[in-house]
Image (cartoon, rainbow, N blue to C red):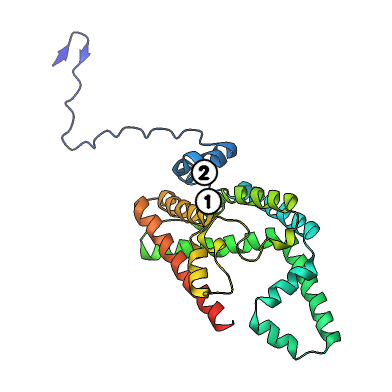
Amino acid sequence: MSSPTGPTPPPPSPYSPPVQAAPEPMGPGLSEGQRLTNVFFAPTKTFEDLKRNPSWWVPFIVSAVFGLIVGIVTVQKVDMRQFAQQQIDKSPLAQRQLEQLTPEQREQNLAVRAAITKGTFYAIPVFQLIVGLIAAAVLMAVFNFILGAEVSFARALGVVFYASIPGVIRAILLIISLLTSSDPSTIDLAGNPMPTNPGFFLDPQGNKVLYSLASALDIFTIWYVVLLGLGFAAASMNRKPSKGTGIATVFVCYGIMVLIGLGFKLAFS
């Protein structure tokens, strides 16, 4: 039967697939400036944005620039031979090795150590990149294979380098200390250069276990660990660990690293 306006449309089939709503379009995302700023005020937004664009070059370059400035200022303000001698004085193993050398060989050895130390300070950005690559690989493996997360290596690098941005504050404070100190050689650059952890107030040649554990409670390091935990939890695509689980996991990894470092220090002291 037809209606006055035309044929009547057939009724919908009960087997027709349900109509699905179109997915909401993704926003434009954060700019690099917003990402860097949010690390301090809303870090989860930065880490969530890594799902859209897992770029990590900008935070690495920012950290590398300040790391290079620290190296340049250190080389200009601190005598490298004196610094190398200070490290020898802290190491009984190095002292025993030097005792077996003639005075001329000792001078040559000290000159070589000073040159290597100088090059090491200039190469801080290279070490930052290497450490970042290793940290990203290790934490990606831990979160993916143990917690069942889904974090790509590119996003892992983004988390690691964005989480390191608060270290810029530490670099600025260290630069100021080097430039304003009447004797920069008294700054413990290889250990605790600033009072940001309880170990700064302890004797590094005293109880080494207590000193190492106290030094591990550094404000900036804990900040970094917390951001890493938040970042890897937020950057997972599907099976997403909770923030608490992410932070606890990175703290466990950090604790293991501290204990391994302490073991090497005791073994070679």
Question: Which amino acid type is marked by label 1?
Answer: Ala
Q: Is residue 134 visible?
A: yes
Front residue of this view, candidates 247 and 59 = 247
Q: Which mark is residue 39?
A: 2
Residue 41 as seen in the image, left or right of residue 94: left
Disc 1 crowd rating (10 Å Cα; few below 14, some 14-19, many 20+) is many
Q: Are marks 2 and 1 in contact (CB under 8 Å)?
A: yes
Please state if 146 lies on the left or on the right of 188 as rendered: left
**Which disc number belongs to residue 199?**
none
Q: Extreme right residue here? A: 104
Query: Where does the image place residue 214, in percent across and percent down from the top left?
Result: 49, 65
Residue 239 at least partly seen: no
Q: Quadrant of the C terminus?
A: bottom right
Residue at 69 percent of width and 73 percent of height = 87
- The mark nearer the N terminus, 2 or 1, is 2
Vertical comparison of 26 with 97: above or below = above
